[in-house]
Image (cartoon, coloured by chain):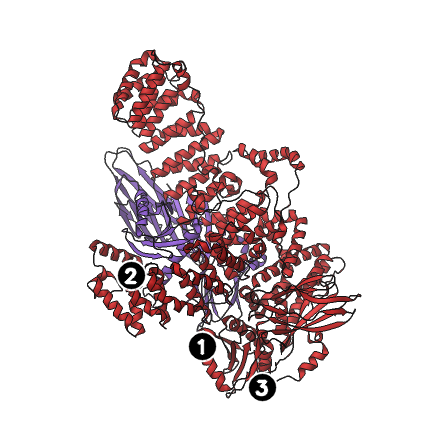
Chain colours: A red, B purple
């Protein structure tokens, strides 16, 4: 950053001056000399009616705030500008308000009405920002207003505003926790939201307000899993962490049968894999008795949908998935996370620091996982010390009999490092390797003894401490080393090392009977100058020698104890008194005296050198608490797996087809379990690489359909971005794709012939879609995309009835022939010519009516239902879109009492059911009309279609063009209205008109087929204008298509409904370009 | 989540603060300063510091500490990654000489990472494939560990909503990848093709790791002879750098740095080319070599003066190497083709390859 040195200097200079900093303040311009004067000037600027002056003043004020200067006395002057028209000024006023409102509550109330007005603004950005500021002002008196605003925003049309509502929830909660119950209601509502934009934010609110209400998640669990990949990165982290906790309460441990195994593996700490498998066989018998574990399909769903996120560029997301796998995945599948975590080691050192802490914990439990990446933990001289030490920890955890020699060689180079803290840590690491791996104990010990002659005292001291611990394991063989260390007392000054040596000599004085009293003699001489810990050990040594060799050491001991008696430190005085009573027999000393030797020279267990990261995994990995190894405020305990799985049906949701599909897929999955765990657990990439040739050929069909034409890719993109419910839809689509692939794979193995048939069939389907008639092609694109129900039909067939239907029936290609003939004749008369003018509310105009499938013949068990948008006003309710439904009974029995039931409309959506059809004879077709108020959104309307025997879940998703009705306008009116809808409300797109779409007639036809709009007369002959009003809110939608030279054209849509505008542009462009 | 943010410069001044909830007094930074004092160097300040009422999470970049104040449990990486993104944004914004007048206005685009209505007169898309070699070479010149980390950085200036696909001749080389969120994951999984609607301007499309099974070609070698003798205040120092496996390309931008032991007082050296500096305070030797001419290998020779009367240093200095090789991706990765859909114009396309030293160390 080029600016950074400048900052440094500036601050350095200014702070040393201490007082008037304005000279350095870029905002003050160096004009002002004192505080009050400056503020007067600012006030003047704020009161002026020039926006530029106001802006300048606000910039200076915000700069003051940022530098921690008090600007609170400007509050009245600033708050006046809250209603300023200039958006830049407004933004800065908001910044100021959020900072000072809490301090000046009364004055802050003056601004509230502005925000309340803002909450009703037609522009979603303004609504959102009003809510954001309102909820950031910490003034308790406005809590009810905030509550109301949040509630209202939670049902806003715009997902962006709903997202802001979710953000406001924790803010209100922290201001007034009494609102919890009401806020939970809002959270519950927003959790049901289907947009990816809202998902992350509402889960965040959930975590802050009511993390204990895990029951609110049930119904949304599958949706969250399915949306996850399309949620923004930060939301992903929050959702994944929450779902980890959720899964721990709802599913069974995937490793429950292995827990025994794990224990035995733990015991054999450095046991090889082979031993583990032997153990496995031994345990197999006892395991067999247990009931077999079957993973809940929802558990699998979570694992499957989070896995791709290991590829995220965001370290926090990768870590979140890694901890999810660590805590939830079957042991065999956890390995996949290692590679991703190792990748993060390339990132910034802070990221490395956190990742290594987690790897350290994981590598204790699952060493095998990181073993292949051993070298990635090798240390470079340029690593910061704290990173070096963590890498060392991991290397030590990974050490086993096979790799220990490599690791020790590596350690050897570390010991020569210039970084002494790191060298000390390396010595400790060597000590741990030596205790854990018996084979190398002597090698390590010899190496450490050599270090005793190192020039650096710290190195020597650390070695002494570690050697002491090692010697405790087998002292008898090492009297030479003890002697060597005894000599060191002359030179080594580090207290801990001196203390360690003294302890060693005392403890093993029998192995060095000649030297020990001499050491005591020397220490007695220097006693008064020693550090406290050394003094304590001198006393200790004296006592032990007194007990074993009182002849030589009696006087020395007396001397030392006398010195200690008058020491300044009371611990030492206490100790001396205590020891004297214990070892020197007097009349008063009681029974304990007899046992003194046993007390002092008891066999002591060798210390266990273990990692400080052991058992840290009882904290959720990746959490702050794990990193600190202490419970942080607000930490949610990671629950233990339940013994019995709670009822899985709580997650069942009565919504469209897709849930049915997924559950069906899951059923299948159970059967194919080994296939899954193989491919996912072991080596994902290699597996897929192996199957590449096969899958590539399979894919060619589908990929050409989605990628070769621009419409295909456009469509894909639209899917990703589309407002409502698209996430799960595309997800669903993918799942189905997978399903189809699998089906094909099976087929491929059955016979090459059938395989080629499928792909050619598919290719032809895609061909027909791109080469179809002008009007039809877009309809097909839509059809392919929109109703999942229409797809479910044929696919189910190819899946379930594989043998009966080797060539699956072609996908239903919708054509006008499906529309009943009577309807076509009805509509023919309504074609508009270029010049025709119509009454104020125009009758609809169209090129062709598209039908969509609601229920396929196969899925509906012989009942097939199609629908189309008749584009006529729905009788009885002008805010509803009329949907014409055509029901055919293809069974050989009569279908009775056909009706709509249990409509599950989303927020504000209303459905007017069609009158019940009492009976429908075999072969008969009935046509009915129902009305749906889509609330100007393309969210699908979900309901059940019932017969006397069955219920079918169906959904109708309207193309955006059907959400409006044409209106008549004069040219002038049009221009006037258009003038009001500029800026944010205007969306423009350039396009090139293809050859077949250049005549006036085709253009008008294409536009009116894409959207239910009416033509507006226009003076210029290179321009086409259309107008409509949205059905629900009556918002104007104005369309202008301007032809430029040649084939170029520009499409403009003006509408205050930005979402509709954006989608409409896309649809119309698509209609024109194809 | 983040309660407050403080920016602290190299001289320990809090020069900027921002509070999202109620104001946290800047005295909370005292805990940070304490930790800073304990750590010998800036990079050793722990990124997470617990205090009685808060937690301080910080990142250190451009000689500035960005200290976030947290009050309750949060994934530390969430905050750290976020702070780094903030710094990236600052860098983008302040990085060039002139600071923009207005901040970019937030837009609600259908594609969250791309604004709508992008227009260019020259439509162009450039991709840089940059590979870095991380290696540790031991005393005798054999490789202890070596891996290739690559990135594809893009500069895309295309009108409208282009939909790009980029394919490789040898995608299997890529062992581990991470994507910009614009990349369609499924397409990569099934076809090994990068399919995406690019953000506007500069961005990192992909980071990858080349599988460890592939032997990594090491393009340079270092011959060194560094010796200190006991009871002598003079030591010998000699290093030569030469090309090894360079696929016929020139190695340039070579820079050698080495941290000398504390006992070294000064160095008297003569380079055969380039310039060198030894800083007697930090004991850092750096030698800017430039291009390697295989006919006349660059070398740096001379003597080291040591503190008199002390024994020779135990440690041996490590040599860090930087270098660049243009028009070469050392892994052999090759882009096959780049196609654009969704827009009608013909963009100008370009791919550049480069290999660099990453963390490249030679132990002596």
Q: Residue A839 carries which label?
A: 3
Q: Where on the picture, by quarter, is residue A413?
A: top left
Query: At which x and y percent is residue B86?
Result: 39, 57
Say which chain tag 3 marks. A
Q: Residue B78 carries which label?
A: none
Left or right: A729 with respect to A520? right
Indicate the quadrant containing the N terminus of chain A: top left, top right, bottom left or bottom right: bottom left
Q: Which mark is residue A72?
A: 2
Mark with earlier residue (2, 3): 2
Counting other residues with Cα less than 10 Å from the Cα at mark 1, is it few (<14), some (14-19), or many (20 or more)?
some
Asked if the residue at tag 3 contacts the one at tag 2, i.e. Cβ–Cβ closer than 8 Å, the answer is no
Check the image and report above or below for A464 versus A788. above
Query: At which x and y percent is residue A20?
Result: 21, 59
- Residue at numbered disc 1: A982
- Say yes or no: labels 1 and 2 on the same chain: yes
Does any portion of residue B333 appear in the rendered image?
no
Between A62 and B48, the one lying in front of the other is A62
Check the image and report above or below for A833 versus A122. below
Name the residue located 22 percent from the left edge and 56 percent from the top edge.
Answer: A13
- Say yes or no: labels 1 and 3 on the same chain: yes
Asked if the residue at tag 2 contacts the one at tag 1, i.e. Cβ–Cβ closer than 8 Å, the answer is no
Say which chain tag 1 marks. A
Q: Nearer the observer, disc 1 or disc 3?
A: 3
Mark with earlier residue (1, 3): 3
């Amino acid at each position: 950053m080029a600016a950074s040195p400048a900052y440094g200097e500036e601050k350095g200079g200014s702070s040393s001056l201490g007082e008037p900093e304005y000279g350095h303040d870029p905002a003050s311009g160096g004009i002002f000399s004192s505080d009050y004067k400056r503020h007067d000037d600012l006030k003047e600027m704020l009161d002026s009616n020039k926006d530029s002056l106001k802006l300048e003043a606000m910039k200076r004020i915000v700069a003051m705030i940022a530098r921690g200067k008090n600007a609170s006395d400007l509050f009245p002057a600033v708050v006046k500008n809250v209603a300023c028209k200039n958006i830049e000024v407004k933004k800065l006023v908001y910044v100021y308000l959020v900072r000072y409102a809490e301090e000046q509550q009364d004055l802050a109330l003056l601004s509230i009405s502005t925000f309340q007005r803002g909450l009703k603004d037609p522009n979603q950005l303004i609504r959102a920002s009003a809510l954001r500021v309102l909820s950031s002002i910490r003034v308790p008196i406005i809590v009810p207003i905030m509550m109301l605003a949040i509630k209202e925003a939670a049902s806003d049309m715009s997902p962006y505003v709903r997202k802001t509502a979710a953000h406001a929830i924790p803010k209100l909660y922290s201001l007034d926790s009494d609102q919890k119950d009401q806020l939970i209601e809002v959270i519950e509502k927003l959790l049901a939201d289907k947009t990816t934009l809202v998902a992350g934010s509402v889960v965040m609110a959930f975590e802050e307000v009511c993390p204990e209400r895990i029951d609110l998640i049930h119904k949304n669990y599958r949706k969250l899993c399915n949306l996850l990949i399309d949620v923004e990165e930060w939301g992903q982290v929050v959702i994944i962490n929450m779902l980890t906790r959720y899964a721990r309460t709802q599913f069974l441990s995937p490793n429950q049968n292995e827990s025994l195994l794990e224990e035995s593996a733990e015991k054999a700490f450095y046991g090889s894999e082979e031993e583990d498998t032997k153990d496995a066989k031994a345990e197999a018998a006892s395991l067999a008795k247990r009931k077999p574990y079957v993973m809940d399909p929802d558990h699998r769903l979570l694992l499957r949908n989070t896995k791709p996120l290991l590829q995220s560029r965001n370290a926090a997301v990768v870590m979140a998935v890694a901890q999810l796998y660590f805590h939830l995945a079957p042991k065999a599948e956890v390995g996949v996370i290692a590679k991703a975590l190792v990748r993060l080691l390339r990132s910034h050192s802070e990221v490395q620091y956190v990742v290594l802490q987690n790897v350290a914990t994981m590598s204790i439990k699952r060493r095998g996982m990181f073993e292949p990446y051993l070298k990635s933990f090798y240390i470079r001289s340029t690593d910061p010390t704290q990173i070096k030490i963590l890498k060392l920890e991991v290397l030590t955890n990974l050490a086993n009999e096979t790799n220990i020699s490599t690791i020790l060689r590596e350690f050897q180079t570390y010991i020569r490092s210039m970084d002494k803290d790191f060298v000390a840590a390396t010595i400790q690491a060597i000590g741990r390797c030596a205790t854990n791996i018996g084979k190398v104990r002597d090698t390590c010990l010899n190496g450490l003894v050599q270090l005793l002659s190192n020039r650096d005292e710290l190195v020597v001291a650390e070695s002494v401490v570690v050697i002491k611990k090692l010697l405790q394991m087998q002292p008898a063989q090492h009297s030479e080393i003890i002697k060597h260390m005894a000599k060191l007392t002359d030179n080594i000054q580090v207290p801990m090392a001196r203390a360690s040596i003294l302890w060693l000599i005392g403890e093993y004085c029998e192995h060095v009977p000649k030297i020990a009293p001499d050491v005591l003699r020397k220490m007695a001489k220097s006693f008064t100058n020693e550090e406290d810990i050394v003094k304590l050990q001198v006393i200790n040594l004296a006592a032990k020698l007194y007990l074993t060799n009182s002849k030589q050491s009696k006087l020395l001991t007396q001397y030392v104890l006398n010195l200690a008696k008058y020491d300044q430190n009371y611990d030492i005085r206490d100790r001396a008194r205590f020891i004297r009573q214990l070892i020197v027999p007097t009349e008063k000393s009681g029974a304990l005296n007899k046992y003194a030797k046993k007390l002092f020279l008891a066999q002591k267990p060798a210390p266990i050198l273990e990692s400080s990261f052991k058992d840290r995994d009882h904290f959720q990995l990746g959490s702050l608490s794990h990193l600190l190894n202490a419970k942080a405020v607000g930490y949610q305990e990671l629950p233990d797996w339940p013994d019995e799985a709670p009822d899985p049906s709580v997650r069942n949701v009565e919504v469209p087809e897709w849930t049915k599909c997924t559950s069906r897929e899951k059923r299948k999955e159970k059967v194919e379990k080994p296939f899954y765990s193989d491919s996912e657990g072991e080596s994902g990439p290699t597996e897929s690489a192996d199957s590449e040739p096969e899958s590539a050929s399979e894919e060619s069909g589908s990929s050409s359909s989605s990628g070769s034409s621009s419409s295909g890719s456009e469509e894909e993109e639209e899917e990703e971005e589309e407002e409502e419910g698209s996430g799960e839809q595309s997800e669903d689509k993918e799942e189905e794709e997978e399903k189809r692939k699998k089906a094909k794979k099976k087929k491929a193995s059955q016979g090459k012939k059938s395989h080629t048939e499928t792909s050619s069939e598919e290719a032809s389907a895609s061909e027909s879609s791109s080469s179809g008639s002008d009007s039809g092609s877009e309809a097909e694109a839509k059809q392919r995309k929109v109703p999942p129900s229409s797809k479910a039909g044929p696919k189910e067939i190819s899946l379930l009835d594989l043998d009966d239907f080797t060539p699956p029936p072609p996908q239903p290609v919708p054509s006008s022939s499906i529309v009943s003939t009577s309807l076509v004749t009805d509509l023919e008369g309504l074609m508009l010519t270029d010049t025709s003018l119509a009454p104020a509310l125009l009758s609809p105009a169209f090129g062709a009516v598209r039908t969509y499938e609601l229920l396929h013949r196969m899925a509906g068990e012989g009942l097939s239902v199609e629908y189309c948008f008749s584009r006529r006003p729905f009788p009885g309710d002008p805010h509803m879109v009329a949907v014409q439904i055509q029901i055919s009974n293809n069974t050989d029995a009569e279908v009775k009492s056909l009706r709509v039931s249990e409509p599950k409309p989303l927020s504000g959506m209303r459905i007017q059911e069609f009158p019940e059809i009492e009976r429908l004879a075999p072969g008969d077709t009935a046509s009915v009309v129902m009305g749906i108020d889509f609330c100007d959104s393309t969210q699908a309307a979900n309901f059940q279609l019932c017969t006397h025997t069955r219920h079918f879940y169906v959904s109708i998703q309207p193309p955006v063009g059907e959400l409006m009705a044409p209106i008549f306008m004069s040219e002038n009116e049009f221009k006037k209205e258009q003038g009001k809808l500029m800026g944010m409300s205007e969306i423009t797109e350039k396009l090139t008109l293809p050859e077949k779409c250049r005549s006036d007639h085709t253009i008008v036809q294409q536009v009116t087929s894409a959207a239910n709009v009416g033509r507006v007369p226009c003076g210029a002959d290179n321009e086409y204008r259309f107008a409509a009003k949205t059905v629900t809110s009556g918002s104007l939608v104005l369309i202008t298509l301007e032809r430029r030279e040649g084939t170029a054209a520009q499409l403009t849509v003006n509408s205050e409904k930005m979402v509709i505008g954006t989608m409409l542009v896309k649809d119309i462009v698509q209609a024109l370009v194809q | 989540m983040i309660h407050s943010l403080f920016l602290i410069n190299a001289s320990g001044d809090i020069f900027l603060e921002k509070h999202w909830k109620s104001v946290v007094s800047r005295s909370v930074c005292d805990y940070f300063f304490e930790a800073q004092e304990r750590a010998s160097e800036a990079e050793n300040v722990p990124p997470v510091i617990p205090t009685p009422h808060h937690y301080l999470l910080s990142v250190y970049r451009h000689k500035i500490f960005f200290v976030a104040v947290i009050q309750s449990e949060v994934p530390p990486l969430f905050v750290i990654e976020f702070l780094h993104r903030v710094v990236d944004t600052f860098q983008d914004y302040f990085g060039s000489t002139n600071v923009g007048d207005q901040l970019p206005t937030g837009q609600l685009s259908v594609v969250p990472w791309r604004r709508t209505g992008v227009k260019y007169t020259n439509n162009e898309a450039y991709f840089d494939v940059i590979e870095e070699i991380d290696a540790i070479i031991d005393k005798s010149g054999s490789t202890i560990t070596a891996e290739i980390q690559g990135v594809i950085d893009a500069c895309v200036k295309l009108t409208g909503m282009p939909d790009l696909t980029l394919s490789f001749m040898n995608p299997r080389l890529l062992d581990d990848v991470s994507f910009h969120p614009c990349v369609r994951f499924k397409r990569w999984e099934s076809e090994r093709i990068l399919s995406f609607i690019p953000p506007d301007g500069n961005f990192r499309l992909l980071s990858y790791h080349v599988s460890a099974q592939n032997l990594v070609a090491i393009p340079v070698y270092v011959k060194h002879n560094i010796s200190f003798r006991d009871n002598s205040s003079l030591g010998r120092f000699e290093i030569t750098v030469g090309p090894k496996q360079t696929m016929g390309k020139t190695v340039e931008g070579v820079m050698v740095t080495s941290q000398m032991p504390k006992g070294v007082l000064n160095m008297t050296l003569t380079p055969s080319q380039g310039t060198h500096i030894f800083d007697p305070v930090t004991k850092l030797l750096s030698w800017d070599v430039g291009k390697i001419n295989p006919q006349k290998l660059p070398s740096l020779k001379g003597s080291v003066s040591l503190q008199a009367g002390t024994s020779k240093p135990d440690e041996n200095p490590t040599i860090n190497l930087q270098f660049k090789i243009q028009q070469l991706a050392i892994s052999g990765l090759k882009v096959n083709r780049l196609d654009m859909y969704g827009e009608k114009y013909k963009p100008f396309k370009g791919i550049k390859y480069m290999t660099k030293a990453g963390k490249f160390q030679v132990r002596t």
